[in-house]
Image (tube, rainbow, N blue to C red):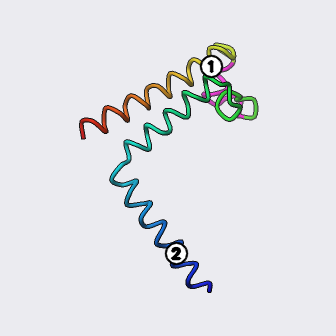
Amino acid sequence: MVDFTLNIISHLLGSTSTFLRNNWSLLLVLIGFLFLLGALFRWKWICDPQQEDPDSWKGKTYRAVGEKGYRVVMGGLGLVMLSGGVACWILL
């Protein structure tokens, strides 16, 4: 039973790895879309750097521009990832 389960997991990871290797730009589009949505809807795991190290870039950006500015920065990063992924998907 354990060997059967390990074979299924190995097969799924292998096919997922092959898919991501061939379609990495779609993954970039998905991550960018999640960052953009997180900034728009104020998701904590995107827009709340309070648990981060205060000397990290997230903490410094949050202190420098405030909450709304930080959301704009994170949304901008999401937009850059989204548009870069779309451009790579179309061109490659």
Q: Classify residue 34 as left or right of residue 14.
A: right
Q: In the rendered view of the protein, which quadrant contains the C terminus?
A: top left
Amino acid at pointer 2: Ile
For the record, the magenta segment spans 52-62
Q: Quadrant of residue 14?
A: bottom left
Q: Which residue is tagged 1?
A: 70
Amino acid at pointer 1: Tyr
Mark 1 or mark 2: name the one nearer the start of the chain.
2
Residue 1 lies in the magenta stretch: no
Count of numbered tags = 2
Q: In this view, does 15 lie above or below 71?
A: below
Q: How far apart are marks 1 and 2 (CA)?
A: 42 Å
Q: Residue at x 37, y 31 (%)?
A: 84
Q: Which residue is tagged 2?
A: 8
Task: Judge the density around disc 2: few (<14), some (14-19), many (≥20) Cα neighbours within 10 Å.
Answer: few
Q: Is residue 38 above or below residue 14?
A: above
Give how far across and how far down residue 26 sits, in percent: 40, 43
Q: Classify residue 24 as left or right of residue 63.
A: left
- Identify which residue, 56 or 81, lies in the foreground: 81
- The residue at the far left in this view is 91
- Identify which residue, 39 or 48, lies in the foreground: 39
Q: Which residue is drawn at 48% across and 65% down?
A: 13
